[in-house]
Structures are given as structure tokens and as C-alpha cells.
């Protein structure tokens, strides 16, 4: 069946119902995910000859080889599914956040009797009794904020089981960074009240906190509890110093998000101002890609849907620079997220609200301009480094795809290998791969390197021999590198050359070994190593790739060691047999995570009872 006939047949079966559609290329990769009230009408509109599509949409249509769809009961369900599908497949032609990393959140462990405050990149998809704030774009900024908050609200950071009967507190108590419930310095009610204040503070609700602290300070002074009164006074002063820096936007007690963006070529920068109780309490920016030839309305709509899926708070009003393509269904969805309370999507035309949108737009333009200038400078540096590497190693062309391999083990145990990939001088982390060494006994890095390289090129060979009906190949192994880099000296270089000859690739793949001792490159057919000039872009790039391969291999090696050691540690815990041990490993994944887990979190693992969880908490 030809491509056009296959698409025509698929469109004939499309239902006149709401749902999501997935457009795929010949390899089965998802190119675009969309939603529609009427799937049949929406998908057919892409192929109307009279349709006035953008150049980007015309390019998409040319690549479509197949269309799948998923029926939903309502348009709102389709909107939720659309987000999940975009998040899963990251289609090239959808507008999406440039970094697919998980953005950090501040997590308040509200479900615990004495809640801790931590930073996490994983927000629970369903209610887990904890409270989350974010997302934020900078982990550094999050930790800076927590450093300030901890001086105002001295929360717990340790893993002690709090009974109030400990005889000695830790150093944090002495430097006033912990309220020390472990020694009974404050009870559960008092501690949870402080953490509740911290949560209100994060939402910009400072007036009730300050009034309560003022009343408590005066009451403590009246009872001649002067040390307690002084502590409350210091807390009040710290809050006042923070509040003084918050710009008052409105005399009204309103919660508003201001969203605006700058759009240039394939990138867009979105600026969000957070106004809580009439004060500007913070701002974040997010970079989008996949915006080439997209109109501003669709870019803005895509961001709003993605942002409020991740956001932990929905305000009563959102100020926007223009209308949304799906305003009606988005307002319905946001109202559900806000607990049934109405959310206004406002496009201000004049006055203070319009000035806020203009200020956010100017911020977005400045950030995008600075980032594009930095990207351009980085690109020039990478091009210079690749050209210098080409010249030094006498390569036929710049090595646009570089693969580097490393081995990590401890006295031959838990041996692992890594493959990291750099494309045009930047990491392509989706192509990184781990290898668990299977055939080598003892600390033999040469044999380990040989096994890893053989398995890598065997995968390439198998992908080349597959038939059209076979599953789609792993993209990390489907292409050959322009330069194969191994961590080591002449010995590792010899192993790499032998493997390339075995697969008849010695004329197709260039290879080099980077030795740590003198940071020299060994290449085939040359006795003396290649010594790149110190501080040269090429040496810096080679070192960066080598160090990344080492880091990636070591991380996997440590994970394997932790898991192998974890089983024996858990076996010694009363009440933990093979089934519960496996459940804990599956649920938490590492000894550190089990140690850090609260009693409530331990009970969430399959088959765990309170006595067993208490034993784990006490003995680990």
C-alpha cells in the first residue's frame, strides 16, 4: 500500500468524536500530537488542498506516513491526554519546553508528623499528602531561597525518628537553623504550625503570619518568657526584611500570574511573574523550542497548557499578551485544577495590567537575546574545537558525532561500561548507554572494554540487517561515530582497533585514546602521542567528553554496588524477607532513598507493615 493510500484509508476510519491523534513518519516515530473535538474533521483539514498552512505544517504533512488516534469521552479528557502524549513522545513538530529535564520543586513532607522541607524533581501525580511549590528553573535559586527560609522557619533536615526524648540536639540547634523537636524544644503542634506558616509564606500570605507572631511575641513578653519573645522578634524582623524587597503591584489582595513571551526563529522565551496577595513574590522564565513558523497564539496556548500541568498553584487570574486558541476548554480545565473556582484569562488593553504584560514581555526579550548570543558564542567555540580536533588527528572531516567509552569497577566487582555521545560538540544524552559487564571476571579493563565495544557494534550490525517488519532500531546504535574515543592509552587503543577490524570498520571509523597522565591522544599508526596545546578548545572538548564517560560509568557502577550491598543489609532487618526486600528495592531503588524515607513512605511499599517499617527505620 502506498503512503497516500494508507493515509486515506486511515482517514476513512476516523470517528466524529473527541480525542487525540498521533502523526507518525515511516519509521513509526511520532511527529506531532494534537487533540480535537471532532477527530475526523480536524485530521482531514491537514490534507485539504485549499488549506492555508504554514511552511512548518506543510513540512509535517509531507512526512506523515501513518496516523493513530485515541478516542476520549470529552474535550477536557483529550486535553489531559494530549499533554501526557507530548510529554512521553516529545514530538518534533509540537511546541515544547526546550529542556526535557525535570524542573525542581520545593517539597514539604506534610504527611509526616514532623515535616521536613526538601528539593525534588519528581512531583507526585496524585495526592500523597505532601505539599509542593514550583516548578522553578534554577536549582541554585531554589537552594538560595531555602537558605533564607530556614533562618525564618528553622525546619528539620535530619532523618531522626522524632520522639522528643533525645538528650542532645545537633549543631543546627546551636546556630538557630533547627527548632530541635528531637529534644522536645517544640512539640508536634508547634512545629507543624511553623511549617504551615512556611507554606503560607511560599504562597505570599505574609500578613497573617506577621500578625500571629506579633501576638505571640507580646504574650511571651507578658509572661516574662523573654528568650521566646526575642526569638519571635528575630523571626518577625527576618520576614519584614524579605517582604520589603517584594514589589507591591496592587492594593487589592489578589493572586495573578502574568505571562508574556518573546519569539525568534525556532526559540521562544516565556516570562512568568507571580503576584500573590497583591505583591510580586517571584518570576521564572522558560525556553520553548519547535516554534518555527508557529503563530504567537499557538505558542502561547502550548505553553499555558504545559505550564499549568506542572504548576502547583493556579491563581484567580492569568494576564496574557494575546488570546488563547483554546481559551474555553483551558478555562474549564483550570477551574477544575483550582477546586471549582473560576479562573479568568485576561488580555489587558490598557492600565496597570497592560503595563505588567509589557514589563514581562521586555524581560522575556532581554533573556532570549542574551541566551541566543550565548548559544551563538558556544556554537562558534564548538566549531573551532571540532576543526582543531580534525586537524590534530588528521581526520577527513570534523567529527560531528563523537562516542566515548569507559569502564568502571572496584577490584573487578560490579563492572560497568559507558557510552556517551556528543553531537557537534554538545552532549546528546538521549543516546547515552550503560553496559553491565557480563563475561569478564576480575579487574580486567581491557577485556571489559572489548566486551562493551563488541556489543555496541553488534547492535549496529543487527540494526543494519533487520527487515522492515522488525521493531524500530535504537537510534543510539543505528549510526556510526565519526570519532571513537576511548579512555586510556595504547592498550585501550589496541583493543578498539581490534574490534573495528573484527567488524570491518577500521576504514570507516576514526579512533583515538585519551590518556589521563599527560592528557595526550594516541592514534593508530603513530608512535608518538598527539599533544594538543594546553587550554586549547580541542583539548578541553576531548577532556570534557572523557570526563563525562567516566562520570556516567561511575554512576552506574555505584548504583550496582549499592543494590548488591542493599540486599545483604536488608536481610539483617527483622521482618524483612525476600518479598518485602524486593518490594522495597522496587519502590525506592537505593539504600539512601530507603534511609531517607519516612515511616509513612515506607508503608507505601507493597506488603509493608508498621512493625516492619519501624524496624527498617531504626536499623538502617
Image: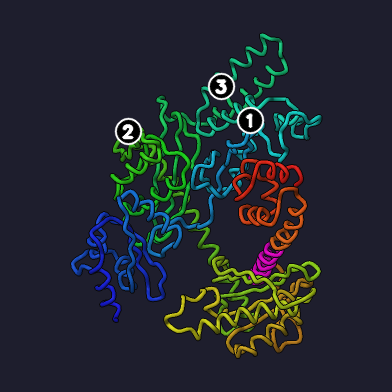
First-in-chain label (1 vs 3)? 1
Q: Residues within 10 Å of mark 2 (few under 14, many from 20)?
A: few
Main SS category, magenta section: helix
Which of the 4 image quarters holds residue 39? bottom left
Percent position of residue 519, x then y: 74, 72
What is the C-alpha distance between the residues marked 2 and 1? 38 Å
Image coordinates of residue 492 in percent, x first then y, are: 73, 80
Rendered image: mark on residue 153: 1
Residue 294 visible in the current orientation: no
> Could you tell me which secondary element the residue under label 2 belongs to?
helix
Q: Nearer the N terminus, badge 2 or badge 1?
A: 1
* Residue 210, numbered circle: 3
In this picture, residue 337 sits left or right of residue 58: right
Magenta range: 536-557
Residue 181 point in image, percent of width and height: 71, 29
Dot 1 falls on a residue whose secondary structure is loop
Q: Quadrant of residue 60?
A: bottom left
Amino acid at each position: 500500500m502506498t503512503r497516500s493510500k494508507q493515509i486515506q484509508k486511515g482517514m476513512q476510519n476516523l470517528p466524529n468524536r473527541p480525542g487525540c491523534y498521533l502523526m507518525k513518519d515511516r519509521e513509526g516515530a511520532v511527529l506531532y500530537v494534537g487533540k480535537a473535538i471532532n477527530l475526523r474533521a480536524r485530521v482531514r483539514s491537514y490534507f485539504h488542498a485549499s488549506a492555508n498552512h504554514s511552511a512548518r505544517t506543510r513540512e509535517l504533512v509531507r512526512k506523515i506516513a501513518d496516523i493513530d488516534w485515541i478516542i476520549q469521552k470529552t474535550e477536557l479528557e483529550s486535553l489531559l491526554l494530549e499533554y501526557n502524549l507530548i510529554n512521553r513522545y516529545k514530538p518534533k513538530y509540537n511546541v515544547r519546553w526546550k529542556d526535557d529535564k525535570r524542573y525542581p520543586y520545593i517539597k514539604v513532607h506534610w504527611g509526616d508528623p514532623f515535616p521536613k522541607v526538601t528539593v525534588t524533581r519528581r512531583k507526585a501525580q496524585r495526592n500523597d499528602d505532601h505539599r509542593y511549590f514550583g516548578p522553578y528553573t534554577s536549582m541554585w535559586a531554589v537552594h538560595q531561597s531555602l537558605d533564607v527560609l530556614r533562618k525564618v522557619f528553622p525546619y528539620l533536615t535530619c532523618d531522626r525518628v522524632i520522639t522528643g526524648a533525645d538528650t542532645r540536639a545537633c549543631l543546627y540547634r546551636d546556630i538557630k537553623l533547627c527548632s530541635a523537636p528531637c529534644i522536645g524544644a517544640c512539640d508536634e503542634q508547634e512545629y507543624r504550625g511553623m511549617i504551615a506558616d512556611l507554606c503560607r509564606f511560599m504562597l505570599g500570605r505574609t500578613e497573617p503570619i506577621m500578625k500571629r507572631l506579633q501576638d505571640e511575641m507580646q504574650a511571651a513578653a507578658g509572661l516574662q518568657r523573654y528568650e521566646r519573645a526575642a526569638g519571635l522578634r528575630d523571626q518577625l524582623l527576618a520576614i519584614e526584611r524579605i517582604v520589603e524587597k517584594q514589589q507591591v503591584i496592587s492594593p487589592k489582595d489578589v493572586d495573578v500570574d502574568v505571562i508574556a513571551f518573546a519569539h525568534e526563529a525556532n526559540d521562544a522565551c516565556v516570562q512568568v511573574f507571580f503576584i500573590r496577595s497583591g505583591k510580586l513574590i517571584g518570576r521564572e522564565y522558560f525556553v520553548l523550542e519547535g516554534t518555527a513558523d508557529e503563530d504567537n497564539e499557538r505558542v502561547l496556548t502550548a505553553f499555558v497548557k504545559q505550564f499549568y500541568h506542572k504548576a502547583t498553584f493556579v491563581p484567580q487570574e492569568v494576564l496574557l499578551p494575546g488570546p488563547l486558541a483554546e481559551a474555553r476548554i483551558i478555562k474549564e480545565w483550570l477551574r477544575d485544577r483550582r477546586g471549582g473556582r473560576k479562573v479568568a484569562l485576561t488580555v489587558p488593553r490598557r492600565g496597570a495590567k497592560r503595563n505588567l504584560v509589557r514589563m514581562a514581555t521586555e524581560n522575556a526579550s532581554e533573556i532570549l537575546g542574551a541566551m541566543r548570543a550565548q548559544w551563538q558564542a558556544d556554537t562558534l567555540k564548538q566549531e573551532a574545537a571540532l576543526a582543531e580536533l580534525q586537524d590534530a588527528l588528521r581526520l577527513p572531516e570534523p567529527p560531528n558525532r563523537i562516542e566515548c567509552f569507559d569502564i568502571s569497577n572496584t577490584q573487578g566487582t560490579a563492572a560497568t561500561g559507558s557510552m556517551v555521545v556528543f553531537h557537534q560538540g554538545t552532549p546528546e544524552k538521549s543516546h547515552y548507554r550503560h553496559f553491565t559487564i557480563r563475561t569478564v571476571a576480575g579487574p580486567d579493563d581491557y577485556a571489559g572494554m572489548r566486551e562493551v565495544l563488541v556489543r555496541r557494534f553488534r547492535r549496529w550490525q543487527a540494526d543494519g540487517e533487520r527487515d522492515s517488519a522488525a521493531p524500530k532500531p535504537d537510534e543510539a546504535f543505528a549510526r556510526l561515530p565519526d570519532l571513537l574515543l576511548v579512555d586510556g592509552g595504547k592498550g585501550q587503543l589496541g583493543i578498539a582497533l581490534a574490534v573495528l577490524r573484527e567488524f570491518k570498520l577500521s576504514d570507516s571509523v576514526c579512533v583515538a585514546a585519551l590518556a589521563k597522565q599527560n592528557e595526550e591522544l594516541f592514534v593508530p599508526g603513530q608512535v608518538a602521542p598527539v599533544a594538543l596545546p594546553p587550554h586549547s578548545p580541542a583539548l578541553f572538548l576531548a577532556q570534557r567528553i572523557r570526563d563525562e564517560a567516566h562520570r556516567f560509568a561511575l554512576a552506574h557502577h555505584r548504583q550496582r554496588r549499592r543494590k548488591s550491598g542493599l540486599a545483604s543489609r536488608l536481610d539483617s532487618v527483622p521482618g524483612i524477607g525476600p518479598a518485602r526486600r524486593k518490594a522495597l528495592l522496587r519502590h525506592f531503588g537505593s539504600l539512601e532513598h530507603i534511609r531517607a524515607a519516612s515511616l509513612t513512605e515506607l508503608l507505601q511499599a507493597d506488603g509493608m507493615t508498621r512493625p516492619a517499617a519501624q524496624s527498617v527505620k531504626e536499623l538502617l
